[in-house]
Image: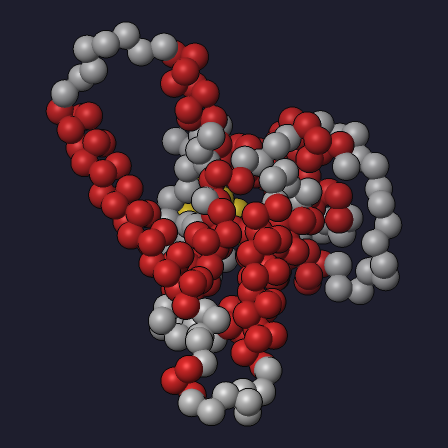
């Protein structure tokens, strides 16, 4: 599909499969030391399917984690009758829990250091020369969202695809050479009316799979360019899209 060939969404903004698992654990309000592997795996595969729909590059790590979750799920379903002592049965989730805890600690530390750097950066100006090209390149790697997780946004996209295309038989490959810029202009026209536009209202009337993907990627690009902003008033409610003031 031409859209995703011309516009690349860097998976670094999602911080990888471990970050997705932490998001799901928090969202499902489950104990990280006693992960309901079957339920989490089901939700995880749902998100991976959405990522594949967008034809994102470097999705291999997500697929590896999916295979790991499926292995753990299968292992836990096996009968343990051959084991004499239940204490001898090693929990297959142990390694995954350690990985999650290490990443969680690293992420929380990174957030604290980032806040401190921002705080002191406002008090003290940098004395060394800052290359504007390098600064622009750094900003391009980030998609700023206010109160909305990118995983939340991806879930909205996945729900939209399911609700819109539930009665579409099969998958017809459609070549779309429409530039992302054209989709961006269409999104701006809908948002420039003044009142905020809800995420699902933005896609109202669109039934073609390639156009839904085009509008979604255009939305991400507009947010990255600080032309629109996205907010979510309540947890898991529909997100609202505003012009960036």
Count of numbered tags: 0
Pick out the residue farthest to the left.
Answer: 123
Rendering coords of residue 15 (x, y %): 45, 44
Q: Is residue 41 above or below residue 65?
A: below
Q: Is residue 113 left or right of residue 8?
A: left
Q: Residue at x 55, y 92 (%)?
A: 81
Q: Which is nearer the eye, 154 or 70?
A: 70
Q: Is residue 6 left or right of residue 20?
A: right
Name the image quarter holding the C terminus: top left
Name the image quarter holding the N terminus: top right
Q: Is residue 156 above or below residue 197?
A: below
Q: Residue at x 32, y 47 (%)?
A: 107
Rendering coords of residue 147 (x, y %): 37, 49
Does residue 196 appear anywhere in the picture?
A: no
Q: Which is nearer the eye, 114 or 84?
A: 84
Q: Is residue 9 left or right of residue 145?
A: right
Name the quadrant containing residue 9.
Answer: top right
Rendering coords of residue 10 (x, y %): 54, 35
Name the quadrant containing residue 101.
Answer: bottom left
Does residue 93 appear anywhere in the picture?
A: yes
Pick out the residue farthest to the top.
Answer: 129
Q: Residue at x 43, y 12 (%)?
A: 133
Rendering coords of residue 108 (x, y %): 28, 49
Q: Residue at x 56, y 65 (%)?
A: 69
Color scheme of the displayed model: secondary structure
């Amino acid at each position: 599909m031409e859209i995703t060939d011309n516009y690349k969404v860097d998976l670094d903004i999602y911080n990888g499969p471990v970050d997705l698992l932490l998001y799901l654990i928090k969202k499902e309000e489950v104990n990280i030391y006693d992960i309901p592997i079957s339920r989490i795996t089901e939700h995880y595969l749902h998100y991976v399917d959405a990522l594949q729909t967008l034809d994102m590059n470097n999705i291999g790590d997500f697929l590896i984690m999916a295979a790991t979750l499926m292995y753990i799920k299968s292992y836990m379903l096996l009968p343990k009758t051959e084991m004499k002592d239940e204490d001898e049965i090693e929990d297959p989730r142990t390694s995954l829990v350690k990985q999650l805890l290490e990443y969680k600690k690293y992420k929380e530390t990174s957030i604290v250091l980032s806040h401190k750097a921002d705080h002191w950066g406002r008090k003290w100006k940098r004395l060394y020369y800052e290359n504007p090209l390098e600064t622009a390149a750094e900003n391009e790697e980030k998609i700023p969202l206010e109160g909305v997780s990118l995983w939340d946004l991806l879930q909205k996209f996945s729900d939209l695809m399911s609700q819109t295309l539930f009665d579409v038989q099969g998958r017809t490959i459609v070549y779309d050479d429409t530039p992302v810029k054209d989709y961006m202009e269409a999104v701006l026209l809908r948002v420039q009316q003044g009142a905020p536009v809800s995420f699902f209202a933005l896609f109202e009337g669109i039934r073609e799979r390639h156009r839904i993907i085009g509008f979604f990627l255009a939305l991400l690009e507009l947010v990255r360019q600080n032309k629109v902003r996205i907010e979510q008033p309540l947890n898991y409610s529909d997100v609202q899209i505003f012009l960036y003031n």
